[in-house]
Structures are given as C-alpha cells and as structure tokens.
Amino acid sequence: QPASLRLMDNQQFQFGQALRPSKGPFGLLVDGLKNFYLTRLKGLDINKICVATIVMEGTIKEVAVQEEKLNTIGLEFQGIPAGEHNGKRGYQLTFAIAYIRDIVLNYGVVAESFETSVPWDRVVNVVNNTKSRLEKECADRKFSHSFISARVTQVYDAGACIYFYFAFNYGTMSMLQAVEVYEELEIIARNEIMASGGSLSHHHGVGKIRKKWLPSILTSNAINVLHSIKNTVDPQ
C-alpha cells in the first residue's frame, strides 16, 4: 500500500492550477503542448478530470514495484501518470491553504474546511450530496461567487476521510455577519453529511461547535460516561 493516497475533485485541481507561479514564454509553450496532449490526443476534459496524489516509501526496488502496480491500475481506468513534480505540488496546497484562508478574508471571502469519515460505499454520495446542497444554499442566498470542493485525504480498508473546502464572497456583509452565515451553512452541510452516511468527525473532534449532534449518535449512557471521564480528569 502507498504511504499516502489522496484524491482531489476537479474544483480543487483547478484551484491548484490557479496557484501555480507565472511562467515565461518557454514554460507557456510546454504547458500548451501538455494541454494539447491531454485534451486532443488522450481525450481528457480538463474541466472534469480528478487527480490522485500518491506517496511511495521504501527501497528503490520496493518503490519501483509499487509504482508499476499503481500505474497498471491507473491505466485500467484511463489514468495518466503525471510525474513526481506534479505529485509534490498536490501536497503543497495542504500546507498553503490556511495562509490562503487568512489572506482572502481581507478581500471579502470567508473560507474554511470541515471533514468526516465515511464507509467506502457512501463516499460518492456524501461528496455529491454535500456539494449539491451547499451550491443550492449559495444560489438561494444569491452569493456572487462561491467555491466548494472535496478531497479524500486518508484511506483505510473500511472507508476514507473526506475534507470539504468551502468559501463564498460575502459582498456587503460585515465580516461578523459573514462568519455567522458560514457557521449556519456548515451546520446545513454537516446535517447533509450525516444524512448521507458520513460521521460527525474524523479527527477534528466534537467540541462546542458539533456537540449539538451528540445525542443523535450516542446513547444517554455513553454521554454520561464521557461526562464522568471529563469531570474526573478535568474537573475545571
């Protein structure tokens, strides 16, 4: 198995492309040739493709064996190996996203992420239903621009962790109003996630924001046990 495996939807792929540094004439020519190869020769739609980033660890021989197996699987599903450089770029967004979130807040955009864990047979439904619901909510509120993307970030035998990235332009609202609207929309998204088979959290935890859902997923006895543990370990 790979050391790390992530799957990004098209919106996140496009976002990553927009963050690439500007290039000179030669770089633009190379990009044009790559685009021609992918779209005209391979028949891919740049506005529909998704991207997997994979980290392999081990000896040179072990990594070569892993890479051969992964390439074989990818080719069975019309995938194209994009190379080590693009793989590394796929992980750069993870490190940059928090800085981007803070910067865009000063330009009228509120953005944040939220996550869930999902059995494999419900991953597609959770992603599609949650994105569709948020897109509808944004349209109903007549936001000028909004962004919702999903990424599978961690994989297990039984399921996966899904991260959602959500942002919208808050226009004439104050920053405080925008944050309140975001919290309202995240509640709607969480309800959709859980109705579609997702969980309350993968690793962010429950905390004050998500505690309202606890009675719907835990019995009263289980909640009492949690209270007893907290009162014993952290009475203050």
Image (cartoon, grey):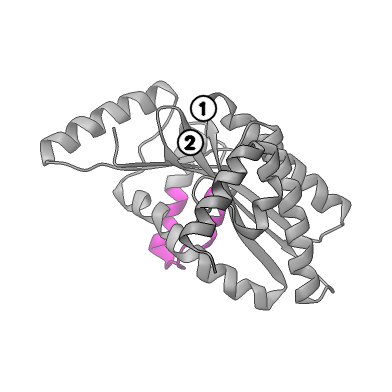
Image quadrant in which the C terminus is located: bottom right
Between 17 and 1, the one lying in front of the other is 1
In contact (CB < 8 Å): disc 2 and disc 1 = yes
Mark 2 or mark 1: which comes first in sequence? Answer: 1
Q: Residues within 10 Å of mark 2 (few under 14, many from 20)?
A: many
Residue 46, numbered label: none
| Amino acid type of the residue tagged 1 in the rendering | Trp
Q: Is residue 170 left or right of residue 234?
A: right
Query: Residue 120, which numbered label?
Result: 1
Location of residue 140 in the rendering, given as x and y in whole percent from the top left corner: 88, 51
Q: Provide the residue designation for mark 2.
A: 160
Q: Is residue 152 magenta?
A: no
State which quadrant residue 208 falls in: bottom right
Residue 63, visible in the rendered structure: yes
At label 2, the amino acid type is Ala
Label 2 sits on a secondary structure element that is: strand
Q: State whether residue 77 is above or below residue 234.
A: above
